[in-house]
Amino acid sequence: MEKIAKGESKMECNTTERKYLTVNPLKTCQPLGAVWACLGIHQCMPHSHGSQGCTSYLRMQLTRHFREFIPTTTSSFSEAQVVFGGVGNLKQAIRNILSIYKPKVIGISTTCSAETIGDDVPGTINEMRASGDIPEDVKVFTASTPSYVGSHVTGFSNMVKSAVETFAQKSSPNGKINIIPGLLSPGDLREIKRILKIMGIDAIILPDISDVLDAPMTGEIHLYQKGGTTISEIEDMGNSISTIVLGREAGIEPAESLKEMYDVPYEVLPLPIGISNVDKFIMKLSEITGKPIPYELEEERGRLVDMMLDAHAHWYNKKAAVFGDPDIVEAIVGYANDLGINVLYALTGTYSSEWEKTVKSMVPDAYVSSDSDLWYLKEQLDKKPVDMLFGNSHGKYLAKEYDLPLLRVGFPILDRANLQHFPIVGYRGTAWLVERTGNTLLDYKDAKSPEHLLELIM
Amino acid sequence: MELRLDIPEREKFIKMKGKHHKKEFICNTDSVAGSVSQRACVYSGARVVLNPIEDAVHLVHGPIGCASYTWDIRGSLSSGSELFRNSFSSDLKESDVIFGGEEKLSKCIDEIYEKYKPKLIFVYSTCIAGVIGDDIKAVCKESSKKYNIYVVPVESSGFVGNKAAGYKAACNSLLDLIKEFPVLKKEPLSINYMGDFNLAGEAWIIKGYLNQMGLKVNTIFTGDSNFESLKKATASSLNIVQCAGSMTYLAKKFEETFDIPYMKVSFLGIEDTSNSLRKIAAFFNDKDVMLKTEKLIEEKTKMAKPIIEKYKRYLKGKKAAIFVGGGFKAISLIKQFRELGIDVVVIGTQNGQKDEYEKIEEIADYGTVILDDANPSELEKFMVEKGADILAGGVKERFLSYKMGIAFIDHNHDRKHPLSGYEGAINFAEEVYTTACSPVWKYVKDGVNKCV
Ligand code: SF4
Ligand code: SF4
């Protein structure tokens, strides 16, 4: 949640003179995160209540990032709705969605215009339920997601929170754990599920976009894929032993709700990227469930350490800037610390003082801000340069201008294919990130070396 | 075949060549609520038109999303400043929405001036700016005076229409700006090129042709343009309009205001390119220009034809579907596919106008399905029914197409190569071939997309 308006936040080293203007943002708006969350629910149609332009844009952005078809419906506001309210459009939209797209679940978020005119979305849904317009077996959940508050990460959190609050129940203990994985890629989720399987842990992951946004090519088109958290799984979340939040900013609020409503305790961990973050995750899993850490994972860890050793000279003492969504930035900062890469800047656009405190404690000498943008980074690079960048595709212009390698992590990645399929979480995922980190630096070195300095053995 | 769809309101947006329809075909209205519409908003229309003005600051007055999503998404190339590729936003917060955002906007402009000292700032209105009722015009006027620069408001609140309304808003802003400049004396053999945004460098190709014909290009609207080049627009004797949807309005206004006539042209495909160049030469009625034009056409055709023929051997008999923004572009694409021996079986546009749909109907083959603002399930349905092998569309359709085992070519913002002129015609053929005949299809589904 946005707690302080831009410009009011007290940064320790306040070098930015801009107080009002945002240039090259490190965030986008709530509805995108909300739709992302809905995509991870089984047979859910994300519906965006508001102007159609917003929906078109977020679909385009998600399509470019995942390189997948992204279904999202819109209430298609025009001038009339803005003057007279959008409830009529919402009703018409729901009827149409039910008849054409036949979802099991509809997840409704709002755009700025719907929020500003103040449509009563939950009330409208209740009314349609009562009148029988929405059949019993179709579930609906709604979240208020105005973009003038927070960012897409906030939208994700709000939507997951609504799913939990709408559906979770308490009956009898299920012996499972809940995992709220934030905005991880399908490849990451697949890896987390593999780890859980090896450990013999039953978990409910909400949301889960694996098998939705990485569905195999069959030559047939399905609007809904086989993946996604089912409603009965979400219902069961009130019965779990504990909730693990991977990434505080995207997941703590839904976990809070589960605790408040059903007394399910929760633990907040960083995204399991980087050996120490993965250790924390595996140990926590073992601690909560009482399951031992299997030898297979120890071997994976051992191989990762081996790889880090083989390549450590390539990155040691390099200076880096990390930017993007808060949770991934925090995790990458941890990863960089593991490797001995010095983080000089850790920047995000989703304001959170808690996040700033945490990251600051990890890299006390770095400039840490959750109210920042990429233009700020550009200005700083002139004064205090780095050797490499970790972040999303928007960093490519900085990489070009300052002649730096850019390791693409996070969202959005618009200029590289297939990355969504490869995990960077867990020991195996981290190993792949280690490979990319070292070899990106070596590729860069080769590309920059004049012929007479080119080396065969590196 | 009976055209029956699940959303009854949608029937009016679909027709089929050769079928008698009692209801009138509806286009260019709002999308039906509840559909997965592909349509963009007024702001987006305005932004794509003005965005390539490269030394201007494009400031989006609204919450962060509107600006974030449009950050450098259009591949317009610049030979000068790169300022336009940055994303400027007033990033409205809750308190601004409650108390109004005018003050913040004016402070943002102060900061922009402080840092960048631009000569030109466009301030875009978004839905929220419209709903909370900020007087953007007044703020712009005041800031213009304060800094003695051009701060131009763009009235692009997203809900007051669709993308086409945004084109118009952008054209109005351009016109307002140009009216402030001194009107220049007409130069005889000079031209403005309207409706090319220099995607992948397309405007450079066409500018090269025009120069070879002996014509001077004063201003391109708006590909690779800048503050200084906009000032020269009134010196031209002719406006040629390529992207008709976005720029015909501006051309008409130019005719009224500055007495510069215009003509619609198309540089998609060999046939349209040659015809358009001849039309332009004929307008100037200058021997030298005509000679040079014929020479250019001959040379270029000689270069391009054999290459295209080579691809045609592989592509002949395939069926294409088209789903693009403007109707005029759809018409050109039909012809261009025909140059490759490909029949077009489904045609849709997002913002096509009535007269364009009439033209489409006229040139389309019998039985071709024609759609306005199609949603994915309709596209899917008709592409399957009509057996399309390849779809030309925008990014949102790409993966739908792949999933269906249908090849895809981006004819929108995400295009990778210039598709204009003779060079563009070759690229088009090459891209169609690359996607339609990729060996990957063998692994997708038996019998899909075989190329001999
Ligand atoms: S109006 Fe709000 S919801 Fe729509 S794109 Fe802009 S920020 Fe996002
Ligand atoms: S809020 Fe309005 S202007 Fe902004 S993206 Fe949505 S429809 Fe377009």
Image (spheres, rainbow, N blue to C red):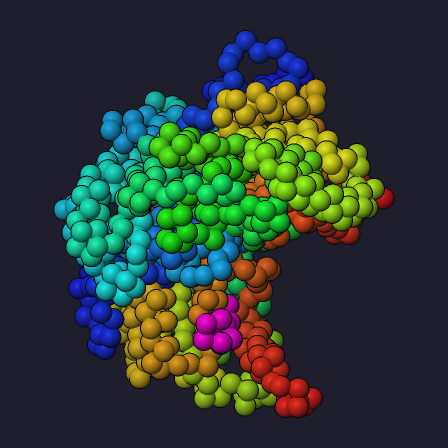
Q: State the quadrant of the C terminus of chain B.
A: top right
Residue B8 visible at all: yes
Establish if B385 lies above or below B89. above
Q: Which is nearer the eye, A190 or B101?
A: B101
Quick check: can you spot residue B414?
Answer: no
- A14 lies left or right of A445: left
Residue at 27%, 51% (x, y): give it: B150
| Stretch of the chain drawn in magenta | A399-411
| Number of numbered discs visible in the structure rendering | 0
Q: Residue furthest right?
A: B452
* Residue A78 in the image, given as x and y percentages of width and height: 34, 30
Q: Residue furthest left?
A: B99
Q: Is residue A10 left or right of residue A75?
A: left
Residue nearest the observer in this picture, B154 or B389: B154
Q: Is residue B393 magenta?
A: no
Asked where in the image residue A442 lies, by quadrant, the reply is bottom right
Q: Quadrant of the N terminus of chain B?
A: top right
Q: Position of residue A119 (x, y in %)?
A: 26, 34
Residue at 57%, 79% (x, y): give it: A444
The answer to which of B24 and B139 lies nearer the viewer is B139
- Report x, y in % for residue B192: 48, 42
Measured from the top left, where is residue A352 in percent x and y? 27, 65
